[in-house]
Image: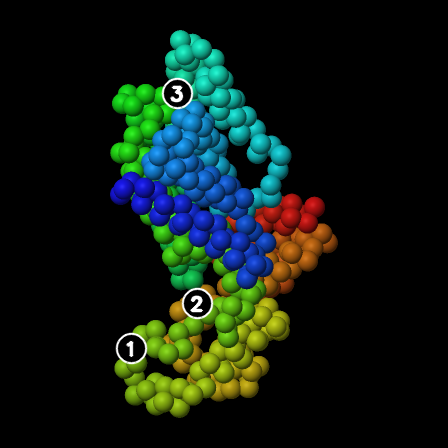
Amino acid sequence: MLNSLILFLCIILGFISVAIIYNKRVDTKSPFINKYLVFIILYSSIRYIFHFIFSIDPSLLPYKVLTIADSIFLIAIPCFYLYFKDLVFEEKYTKINLLHFVLPSLLILLMVISNIIAKQNRLFIVKIFIIIGGISVLLYLTLVFILLYKNVWFRKSEIKLVQVQNKLIRNWTLFLYFSLFPIVIFRFLTITFIYGPIGYTHFGILLPALIWCLIFLKFILTPEIQYGYGFLNQNITESTSQFIIPKLWSTEIPTQKINIARDEKLAEKLSANIKTYIRQIEEASFHSQIFRNPDLSTDDLAAHIKIPSSHISFLFKYHCKETFSDYKKIVRVYDASKLLDNGYIKNNTIDSLSAEVGFVTYNTFHVAFKSIIGMTTLEYIKRVSQQTG
């Protein structure tokens, strides 16, 4: 009974996760939805439907159907690799990715054949399935580990907003990888040494189902993990609340304790206008070219939006989660990404782009762009050309 309840819960959580993906797709108009993640979640949910039926009454489902449904898990393994790859690089789909599914498809075909041929010949085919499938799984687990180790788990940034995004993706990939690892290892151990080929036992299916429940719950609670590093840029371009970058501002509680008497007086004076001032700052940031001035100061910004400089300094000190210097980098990188989206590089160089948006040196621009967007300018240009090509 407990086993059936856990399987049923896993199925429900899986389909809720898929619904969240498509709901987010509609709500945010995100250009990026990961097809591999959809397949992984859908497959896991549908697979557990079979196991749920089998747990209630084995006579309702032919055992051969269950073995084939379990063997399809091999297709999910390269999907995990391609999902993590897309999460990092957000590459456009190419037909070459289909090569990852040739071997799993052949192995699944072997499992289908093993259920048709005579019983005495079945064991040999199953051994081939286990050996080649096991090697394939270990290879992909290694590839995923290398990919995440090099590109995600130790990614650094000086920008606090980017640090938050990096931490979100790092924690999600660590959680997913080290949840996937025991599921795969446990499954092959039970298949090979304990229960026989794709054998069904309550315990053998219970542990993976519990882990999948945790994965689905994590996804449901933090659905933004479906996006890659470009999600930060998406947050900038879309107005999800009254501010363009809502996560950057703290309107109700100061980011640090106010101990200076002068600042305490300013806090009282500005309390009713903080949101208005922030909207004015963002209007100037993303709908004018004032930040292209490499020498831009808080005085210049104050003069542009016609409020006292002391008010601007106060807002960045107590109500912005970034320093004014880092805020300028975010705005300028956003500006650069929009120019690249509109074909700036067709008639200009990257050096001129860095100067155009307000960076003093190319090196500073290069570091800031990669830190905030999550890829170099050349990688970004390649992605833009793939999306528009």
**Residue at screen point 40% across, 81% down:** 314
Real-space Cα separation, disc 1 to disc 3, in angstroms: 61 Å
Q: Residue 257 carries which label?
A: 1
Question: In 3D space, how far apart are the residues under numbered discs 3 and 2 (Cα atoms)?
Answer: 48 Å
Residue 332 in sight from this viewpoint? no
* Amino acid type of the residue tagged 2 in the rendering: Lys
Q: Is residue 234 above or below residue 389?
A: below
For disc 1, the neighbor class at 10 Å (few under 14, some 14 to 19, many from 20) is few
Residue 22 visible in the displayed image: yes
Q: Residue at x 43, y 67 (%)?
A: 247
Label 2 secondary element: helix
**Residue 130, which numbered label?**
3
Q: Residue at x 39, y 74 (%)?
A: 250
Q: Which of marks 1 and 3 is in front?
A: 3
Which residue is label 2 attached to?
247
Q: How many labels does the image show?
A: 3
Colour scheme in the image? rainbow
Depth-wise, is mark 3 or mark 2 nearer the camera? Answer: 3
- Secondary structure under tag 3 reads helix
The quadrant in which residue 129 appears is top left
Identity, as a three-letter code, of the amino acid under mark 3: Ile
- Find residue 189 and report its horizontal and vertical position in percent: 30, 26
Q: In this view, does 197 lie above or below 21?
A: above
Asked if labels 2 and 3 touch by Cβ distance under 8 angstroms, the answer is no
On screen, residue 272 above or below 248: below
Which is more N-terminal, label 1 or label 2? 2
1 horizontally vs 94: left or right: left
Q: Which amino acid does label 1 sit on?
A: Lys
> What is the x, y in percent for residue 42?
47, 43
Residue appearing at x 40%, y 26% in the figure: 63
Q: Residue 334: x percent and y percent?
A: 56, 62
Q: Distance between the residues labelled 2 and 1?
A: 19 Å
